């Protein structure tokens, strides 16, 4: 019991020290592994461990990439929407413009709830994030999907994300789809990205496996999605996104392969929004009237 008390004290101390994230993650991940290994055979009060867990939600990350709020020209957004109404296609520049507006809008709306997104893992905001980013596109008549990682990749929990498909003029008109996930960062917190998570099942009502970020191989991909909130949906990117979620469904050391197709599972599994509770948050592109869906 004394050892656990010391471990928790160290976690709380290191967690709020002003040291580089990479160094902090390395120290804290080892400390958490020791906590979960110790707690298996201990009568230590679980509430104290859980409180420490909660208090260190956003103190460090396996991959530390804050979201980026980009400068978006509202007049150009209006022009892009007018252009689409008239011609039913976008330029590639207009696609990026509308995606950036949608991601900015979601992030700024979440901040209105008192969340400082630069330092927050955004754990618990995926349903709202999905709605705020996908619905504006749905309202202007674009094809969207509302997805959960459980249905698409067999992840044991429901994490909400989505896609939007644009008709883009590239010589001829082609369809380009983008995966959108503004709360992806939550899967890279140190408290969940450590080997010790495999030992939490009997001690807590917590996942008994590390978070998907623990299984991510392409750090550049992860950083881009966390920074921008969206990424081009290709066969390769679908696997980079979906495979780590699937690996969370496996036991430690299990090497079973995913039997489906990540891209098809994203685009073809039709789901509904997990929430429609938007209170008075903005889900409209600027200066547009709502269309009935």
Image (cartoon, helix red, strand yellow):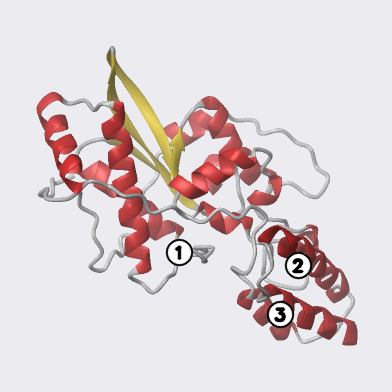
Q: Do the residues bearing badges 1 and 3 touch, measured as CB atoms within 8 Å? A: no
Which residue position holds label 3? 12
Quarter of the picture holding the C terminus: top left
Residue drawn where x is 16% and y is 31% of the image: 84
Looking at the rendering, which quadrant does residue 87 occupy?
top left
Residue 246 visible to an observer of this rendering = yes
| Quadrant into which the N terminus falls | bottom right
- Badge 1 crowding class, 10 Å Cα cut-off, few under 14, some 14 to 19, many 20 or more, is some
Q: Is residue 118 left or right of residue 277?
A: right
At 89% across and 82% down in the image, what residue appears? 3
Q: Residues within 10 Å of mark 2 (few under 14, many from 20)?
A: many
> Residue 7 location, x and y as percent?
82, 78
Give how far apart the Cα atoms at labels 1 and 2 are: 22 Å
Q: Are marks 1 and 2 in contact (CB under 8 Å)?
A: no
Tell me which numbered mark, 1 or 2, is placed earlier along the sequence: 2
Foreground residue, 117 or 22?
Answer: 22
Q: CA distance from mark 3 to mark 2?
A: 9 Å
Return the x and y of residue 244 as percentages of the image width and height. 65, 43
Q: Which quarter of the figure has residue 189?
A: bottom right
- Which of 260/27 is in front? 27
Mark 2 falls on what kind of element? helix
Q: At 26% from the left edge and 26% from the top edge, which residue is drawn?
A: 91
| Left or right of 292, for residue 73 | right
Label 2, on which residue?
28
Of mark 3 and mark 2, the one earlier in the sequence is 3
Q: Which residue is mark 1?
A: 117
Among the 4 quarters of the image, the one containing residue 85: top left
For marks 1 and 3, the one nearer the N-term is 3
Question: Decide: marks 3, 2 in contact (CB < 8 A)?
Answer: no
State the SS at label 1.
Answer: loop
């Amino acid at each position: 019991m004394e050892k656990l008390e010391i471990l928790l004290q160290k976690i709380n101390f290191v967690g709020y020290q002003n040291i580089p994230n990479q160094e902090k993650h390395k120290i804290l991940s080892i400390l958490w592994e020791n906590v979960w290994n110790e707690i298996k055979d201990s009568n230590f009060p679980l509430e104290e461990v859980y409180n420490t867990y909660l208090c260190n939600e956003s103190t460090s990350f396996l991959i530390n990439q804050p979201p980026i709020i980009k400068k978006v020209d509202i007049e150009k957004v209006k022009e892009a929407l007018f252009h689409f109404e008239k011609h039913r296609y976008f330029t590639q520049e207009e696609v990026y413009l509308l995606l950036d507006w949608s991601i900015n809008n979601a992030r700024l709306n979440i901040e209105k709830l008192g969340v400082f997104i630069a330092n927050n893992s955004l754990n618990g905001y995926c349903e709202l994030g999905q709605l705020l980013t996908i619905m504006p596109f749905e309202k202007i008549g674009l094809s969207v999907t509302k997805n959960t990682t459980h249905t698409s990749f067999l992840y044991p929990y429901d994490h909400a994300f989505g896609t939007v498909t644009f008709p883009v003029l590239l010589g001829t008109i082609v369809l380009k789809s983008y995966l959108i996930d503004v709360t992806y960062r939550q899967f890279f917190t140190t408290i969940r990205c450590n080997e010790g998570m495999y030992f939490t099942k009997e001690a807590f009502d917590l996942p008994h496996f590390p978070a998907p970020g623990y299984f991510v191989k392409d750090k550049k991909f992860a950083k881009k999605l966390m920074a921008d909130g969206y990424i081009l949906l290709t066969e390769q990117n679908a696997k980079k996104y979906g495979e780590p979620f699937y690996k969370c469904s496996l036991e430690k050391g299990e090497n079973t392969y995913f039997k489906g197709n990540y891209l098809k599972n994203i685009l073809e599994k039709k789901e509904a929004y997990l929430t429609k509770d938007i209170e008075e948050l903005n889900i409209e592109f600027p200066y547009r009237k709502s269309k009935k869906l």
